[in-house]
Every structure is written in structure tokens, then in C-alpha cells.
Amino acid sequence: MSHATNGFPLEGSVTDAAQPAPQGLPGLPAAAAPRTSTSRMIADALRTAIVEGTLAPDAPLRQDAIARHFSVSAIPVREALRQLASEGWARIEVNKGACVASLSRDEAREIYEIRSALESLALGLAIPNHTEQTLREVKALAAAASRERDPSLYVARNEAFHMSLYAPAGRPQLMEMLTTLHQRGERYLRLKFGFPAYKGESDAEHTEILAAVQRRDIPAAQTLVAAHLLGTGELIYRFLTERAAAQPAAKKRRASRAPASPATPRSRSRTPDEASS
């Protein structure tokens, strides 16, 4: 899908779904709350469509079309697009408007590098606080992710597994940062389904990480989770690099297979009598 007028996960208009804003503090403008709420809901809908692939990379995000779809004015749409641009989901160019951000091999690798460092830290803090109950929950989530074949559900189950490993750390700001990184990496994580063998390897790595956590072996668990995440980032980086290199060749092959334009009809040979006329 390359436009922004159909296929969003929200039904009806955003204004229909928005709840009346509660009374604010004295001095705050009453109109700001519903507009902010509307822009946030539009941003959430667009973000979901981008993550799920309904809106493809580089697809235009036309402000007027989005406003018509959600039955709102241009103001909350502009705010929503600015929010998505600040989060890296959209790109806004002067005199060109907004579009879905491209998949970037450099961004993918960097996200997983940062996750590697932060999740290793979080796991080290969490392991001493894990209980038999929390470990059973982590094990169940790992098994659910391993069985999952639907990309959308796998992304959710994979995140739940990782976050359950770190939850006992008791570091809310760290968990908030990790949640943001997981969201930024969702589009890239879905690429794993193009490598069925790698998904199996990834699930096996989850099992190894969990085993180290159950043994309370902090150094081993940190090493395993770091290698797991760095390996995923490098895989996605190589995949996007190879895909970018293959695109010019694919375009060339398509051009060579395209039917030739009709030849200009030859003029009929003139007879001697016609030539002398």
C-alpha cells in the first residue's frame, strides 16, 4: 500500500474515538488537550501501519489524505507527522512533504548495538532478583515465542520474553528506554522471517540465555544476550546491504524483459511508374 487513506487499524474517525478531555489546571488552554490526544492517536495508527507493513518504506504520508481519513483538521495531522519524524518512523522534507522512513541498515545495526549494551546491563541487575515464579514466566514466554509463526505475534512475544528477563532489575527508566528500542526495531525484527533457519537459531539462543539466568551465572548470561543481539543486528545489516546491491541488477533485468516499442512501419517500395510520377 502506498497511500494513507485506507487500511489503518483504527475504524471510524479519531474524533469519534477520542474521549472528552478532563478539566485541566487553571491557566492551561482547554483546546490543547483534545488536539494533543487526537494527534497522538493518529500517530499511533500510522506507526502501527508502518510496523505491520501496511504503509511501505518511502510511501507518501499526504497530510490532506490523512486528515480526510480521520475526519480531522490539518493541525493534529501535522503534529502526528512531526512526532513520527522525531521518532524515526517518518521523514519530512521541505517542499516534498512527509513519507515513511526507509529501512536503514545503519539504523538497524545501531539499534541492536545499543540494545546489546543496555540489555546486558539490565540482565545483570535482574538476575539476583529473579524468583522461581518469574523464571517460570520467562520460560513460558520463551516457549510461546519459539512456537509462533505469525510475524506480528512473534514480535510481541519476543519483546515480552526479553522484557520479562529484565523486569526484576527494578530500573523503570532503563525499561522505558528498552521499550522504545524494541519499538524502533520492530520493522527490522520482522525481516527474521525471511530466514527460517535463523529464527530457529535465535530461539535456541533464547534457551541458552534462560539456562544461564536459571543458574544465576551473570557473566555467561550477559555474554549470551549481547552476542544474541549483536548477531541479529549484523544479520539484518548484511541482508539490507545485499538487497540494496541487488536492486539495480533487478531493475536492469526487468528493463531487458520489457517489450520493445513498436517499430516505425517501413515505407512501401515505390514502383518505377510511381517514382516517375
Image (cartoon, rainbow, N blue to C red):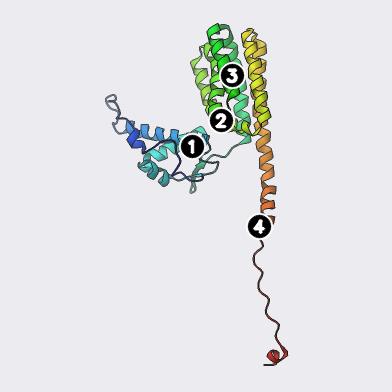
Q: Which residue is rendered at x = 67% and y = 62% of the image?
A: 260
Q: Earlier in the sequence, mark 1 or mark 2?
A: 1
Q: Nearer the viewer, mark 1 or mark 2?
A: 2
Q: Which residue is mark 4?
A: 258
- Relative to 144, residue 40 above or below: below
Helix, strand or loop at mark 1:
helix
Q: CA distance from mark 4 to mark 2?
A: 36 Å
Q: Which mark is residue 71?
A: none
Coordinates of residue 110 in the picture (x, y in percent): 62, 29
Q: Nearer the viewer, residue 121 or 93?
A: 121
Q: CA distance from mark 2 to mark 3?
A: 14 Å
Labelled pair 2, 3 in contact (Cβ < 8 Å): no
**Number of other residues with Cα within 10 Å of mark 2, as a class: few under 14, some 14 to 19, many 20 or more:** few
Q: Which residue is rendered at x = 35% and y = 42% of the image?
A: 71
Q: Which residue is mark 2?
A: 150
Labelled pair 3, 4 in contact (Cβ < 8 Å): no
Q: Which mark is residue 143?
A: 3
Coordinates of residue 10 in the picture (x, y in percent): 41, 36
Q: Quadrant of residue 277?
A: bottom right
Q: Which residue is rendered at x = 38% and y = 45% of the image?
A: 68
Taking 174 as reference, is 28 left or right?
left
Coordinates of residue 21 in the picture (x, y in percent): 30, 28
